[in-house]
Image (spheres, grey):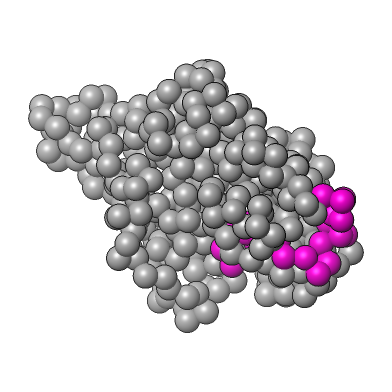
Amino acid sequence: MRKNIRIPALALAGALALTTLTACANDAASSGGSAGSDDAAGSGTTAGSGAPAGKATKVKIMVGGLDKVIYMPAMLSQRLGYFKAEGLDVTLLSEPAGVDATTALVAGQVQGAVGFYDHTLDLQTKGKHVESVVQFSQAPGEVEVVSTKAAGDIASAKDFKGKHLGITGLGSSTDFLTKYLAVQGGLKVSDITPVAVGAGATFIAALQHGSIQAGMTTDPTVAQILDKGAGKVLYDMRTPDGSRQALGGLYPSSSLYMNTAWVNGHKDTVQKLANAFVKTLNWMSTHTPEEIAAKMPADYAQGGAQLYAASIKATLPMFTADGVMPADGPATVERVLKAFNPNLRNATVDLGQTYTTEFVKNVR
């Protein structure tokens, strides 16, 4: 865990390509993003904080897919009113992949990002200091699915050679994990062709039309694929056991991460965010999938309420109840990334600077 030091903000490296963010608000609105009954300050005082609602602290958080179950704590915190209870006015924005959320964070467009923890290691090798402040999960929540048509040709990662494999985006965590599985299967990264197909309808269409023979995605997309008979599960990393089998250990993934310099300069705000998210994680651990689904925006249940609740049930085991980083998790992430990434393989990563438990352990 990092020490409490101030690190000056660094300039955005040219190696990290910026994406246009002008459509983010519209994207978020279509995904239930910046809208929500609990994010705007009302009259009177803010419950649980004693602060006037009009004085609420504004925070923007970019999420790598608001409707993905793996990032559910972001919207759920909003819907449960926990941000507002902390005196926060949180705007949730949405990008299709975690790498896009990371780009927005590093570019200074938002104060926080909800995406995979592994980006903090990758960024450190590029001179960026970003850290996980609330660790939502201890497993990737990802599933490698094979199309029904290609199921006879792909029995394991060793059969990925020459195949087109779906990922959310180039440089995304699905890209990282796909390359790791290929290398573990005895292949070279150059033996496979990653194809950025996003998630949801675009991923399913690519699988059905043969644009990809297999791919990595999350719920609710997984549940919809299985329901349509469009594919079958090859590797299931939605549980701690599934993570250990595929990756050799717990793999902390979805988290709230922020620029270290901003964290050090806004500790009160970060603590309030940690309070809200840990309360949400605890709430998730004590409620049924159906109760959780009922709190989420109705349009997230693309395959129907029953299928959506089933997708939440399948993914719930990945989440922590306290937001604390698993003790051996960072080392597993480093080992996985170094298996296929030459930049990381030849770099010394200070894992203690990639996360902190300071705030989650002080949640009141």
Which region is colored magenta? 151-176
Q: Position of residue 72 (x, y in %)?
A: 48, 37
Which residue lies at the image location 83% right of the left edge and 67% below the top edge? 161
Of 48 and 28, nearer the camera is 28
Which residue lies at the image location 40% right of the left edge and 63% below the top edge? 104
Looking at the rendered image, the quarter that the C terminus falls into is: top left
| 87 versus 57 height, above or below | above
- Whether residue 165 appears in magenta in the rendering, the answer is yes
Of 343 and 22, nearer the camera is 22
> In the image, 72: left or right of 325?
left
| 90 versus 9 height, above or below | above
Q: Is residue 278 visible?
A: no
| 190 versus 88 height, above or below | below
Q: Quadrant of residue 141?
A: top right
> In the image, 126: left or right of 276?
right
Q: Position of residue 138 (x, y in %)?
A: 64, 40
